[in-house]
Amino acid sequence: MKRWLGWLLLAGCAAANAGDADDPMLPPSELVLRAISSTPEVRRAEAGVSTADALARMRASGSYEGQVTVIPQRRRVEGDRDYNEWELDVTRPIRLPGKARLDREIGARGLQAAQLSLEDAHHAAARRLLAAWSDWQRARVAREQWQQLVDIARRDRDAVARRVALGDAAERERLATESALAQSQASLLRARSAQAQAELAWRSVFPSLPLPEREAANAYAPPALTGSDEAWVRLIMVRSHEVGASEALARQKDAEARRARADRVPDPTVGIRMLNDLGGRERAYGVVLGIPLGGSYRSAEAARASADALAAEADLAGVRRDIEQGARTVVASARAGHAIWQSQRDALQAASASAAKVARAYALGEAGIAELLAVRRTEQEAMLAERQSAIDALEALARVQVDAHAIWHRHDADDDRPSASGLSALPDIEG
């Protein structure tokens, strides 16, 4: 009862969040789904579903096709005339009871595995898109931040140069500002190169999804992951298509093993036989029954199929273990990412306060230009670290939601599991 209540709470939470707007730091969901569907991996998986469907229909109908054998011949009798004769055999193998059901089960399990593999390919593409998008966001933020530092350094250089011309500052102060400007420009060039590489990587994989032209907001507070860790881990496990595909393959291998054991009793071939001899003066009708004599080959085939079924069960256990470990890791990363961003935010506030004090002291002649440049660089670096840690926190949170199929996932109409287009919170459903 507790379990059902938990799922009802989860479904209610999903419905409540279904209308949430996309995060401004993430691409729109409809564009994401369109870009993911056009990736080669997803298209290949779609072809795999068509292949599995054809194989399922082939197994359902079976390869038990009829055969017609016609033997025309001419009989020559000594002292008599020649006679035209013929023999007609119509035969067909018969699938023994139970084998047809196993063949249909094998085909259905294979089709199910292919469909789940398609969804898993979609999920893997969503994770690649999130990683590439976050890499580009971090590169863009770094370029923007270094551009701001270059602008500040250039203003400082010009202001000090005017003071030197008026005799209010020493030449060494101008040299210090020139050095700070050159260092900032070098860092800006590196940041531009990194952003260009990130854009190239993005456009090569997701060319149909454009990158935003506007600059990112300086003040962005990533949302925190709400709900219990265990609830998120269970949701990721339940909705994992990789686990579902591995389970379907394990069930298929088990059915194949049972089919191979059933094949130790060979399928008979039955048919009718008609003879026309001596130009039609003699006619015969009969029944044809052929039974293959099974030997050690069929037993070895059954043993091989049973071993494959055991290996598939072991693979399923390994996939479940890896998915659970990965789920716990991404949930822990989301928690840690938000805490790291909060610490970086506090560090930025302290650096900004220190820079403001040194700027006032420099205006009053109580601090030198070197000290001012140092605290400004520290403030800009703290601002860059804060903005990048915000992106890291958002990526970690979105990774949990992607793995839980709460965002960027195609939900089937007959999927009875809870689903949402913008799930950002999850109730505690322990027990």
Image: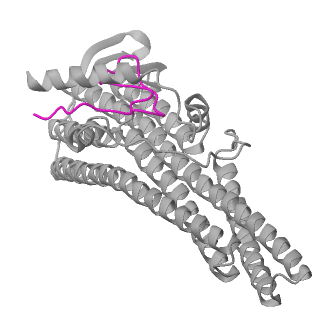
268 relative to 31 in the view: left or right: left
Image position of 160 with respect to 326: above or below: below
Residue 177, percent across and down?
A: 76, 79
Q: Is residue 401 left or right of residue 210?
A: left
- Residue at position x 63%, y 80% in the image: 371
The quarter of the picture where residue 251 lies is top left
- Residue, x 66% and y 60% (percent of image)? 145
Report the residue at 39% width, 21% height from top: 87
Q: Quadrant of residue 416?
A: top left
Q: Is residue 413 magenta?
A: yes
Helix, strand or loop: magenta stretch: loop
Out of 66 and 305, give the one closest to the viewer: 305
* Residue 66 visible in this rendered orientation of the protein: no
Q: Is residue 115 left or right of residue 173?
A: left
Where does the N terminus fall, quadrant-wise? top left
Q: Residue at x 77, y 71 (%)?
A: 156
Percent position of residue 415, x then y: 34, 21
Q: Quadrant of residue 294?
A: top left
Picture coordinates of residue 317 (x, y %)? Answer: 20, 50
Viewer-proximal residue among 312 and 353? 353
- The magenta segment: 406-431
